Amino acid sequence: MGKLLVLLIVVLVLLLLWKGMKRAARSDGGGTPSDGERMVDCSECGLHLPISEAVQSQGRYFCSEEHRRLFSR
């Protein structure tokens, strides 16, 4: 009975490892540029940031509201 329990535990551990390897292979798929988000640079300090986090004003992008105000002075 003990050998059967050990065998069951070994099989479960191997199954979990196999599923983890499949998941890692799927998420590590070597992505294409279209998978990412467009990056822009702050017109005030030059910091690169995702466009979704940027503040836009008059066709320019800024990393913060403060830099937008400083640039317009």
Image (cartoon, grey):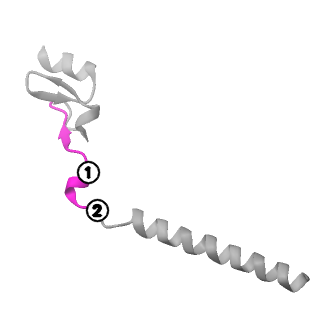
**Residue 15 x/y as whole percent:** 62, 74
Q: Write down the residue under mark 2.
A: 31
> Residue at horizontal 20%, vertical 54%?
34
Q: What residue sits 23% from the left and 61% below the top? A: 32
Q: Which residues are magenta?
A: 31-43
Q: Earlier in the sequence, mark 2 or mark 1?
A: 2
Q: Secondary structure at mark 2?
A: loop
Q: Secondary structure at mark 1?
A: loop
Q: Which mark is residue 53?
A: none
Residue lying farthest to the right in this orientation: 1
Residue at image position (12%, 16%) is 72
Name the amino acid type tagged 2. Answer: Gly
Q: Is residue 3 left or right of residue 43?
A: right
Q: Are marks 2 and 1 in contact (CB under 8 Å)?
A: yes
Residue at the far top: name it.
73
Q: Residue at x 91, y 83 (%)?
A: 1
User: Crowding near pointer 2: few (<14 within 10 Å), some, many (20+)?
Assistant: few
**Relative depth, front residue between 37 and 54:** 37
- Image quarter of residue 40: top left
Residue 35 lies in magenta, yes or no?
yes
The residue type indicated by label 1 comes to Gly
Q: Which mark is residue 36?
A: 1
